[in-house]
Image (spheres, rainbow, N blue to C red):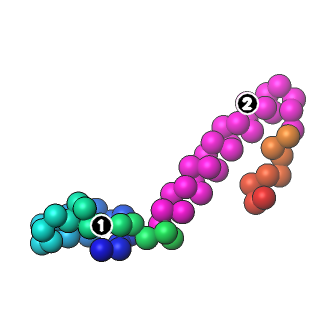
C-alpha cells in the first residue's frame, strides 16, 4: 500500500491489513520532501560554520 507518512493512515492500515508492516510503502513526493528539508538543514549548519571562518563557498547555494 502506497501512502504518505501521516501516522493515522499508518495506524489504520496496521489495524486492518494483515502483515501491514511488510506492505506499506511511502510515496516518493513525501519522502523527497523530508530529504530536501534534511539537506537544507545540513547546508545551513555548514554555511554558518564556514561563514564564521570567512569562507563563502556555500553562499547562494540554496536553490542549486
- Residue at the spot 83% in from the left edge and 46% down from the top edge: 59
Image spot of residue 30 (x, y percent): 47, 66
Crowdedness of circle 1 by 10 Å Cα count: few (<14), some, many (20+)? some
- Badge 2 is on which residue? 49
Left or right, 43 with reference to 56: left
Does the magenta run of residues contain 36?
Answer: yes
Q: Which mark is residue 55?
A: none
Residue 55 part of the magenta segment = yes
* Residue nearest the viewer, comparing 42 with 13: 13
The range drawn in magenta is 30-56
Query: From where the camera sits, is residue 8 visible?
Result: no
What residue do we see at 63% from left, 42% from top? Answer: 42
Q: Is residue 37 left or right of residue 54?
A: left
Residue to which mark 1 is pinned: 24
Q: Residue at x 64, y 50 (%)?
A: 40
Give the x, y percent position of residue 12.
18, 69
Between the residue at mark 1 and the residue at mark 2, the CA separation in whole angstroms equals: 39 Å
Residue 42 higher or lower than 36, as above or below: above
Amino acid at each position: 500500500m502506497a501512502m504518505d507518512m501521516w501516522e493515522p493512515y499508518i495506524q489504520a492500515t496496521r489495524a486492518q491489513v494483515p502483515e501491514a508492516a511488510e506492505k506499506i510503502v511511502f510515496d516518493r513526493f513525501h519522502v523527497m520532501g523530508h530529504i530536501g528539508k534534511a539537506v537544507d538543514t545540513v547546508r545551513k549548519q555548514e554555511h554558518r560554520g564556514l561563514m564564521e571562518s570567512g569562507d563563502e563557498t556555500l553562499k547562494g547555494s540554496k536553490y542549486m
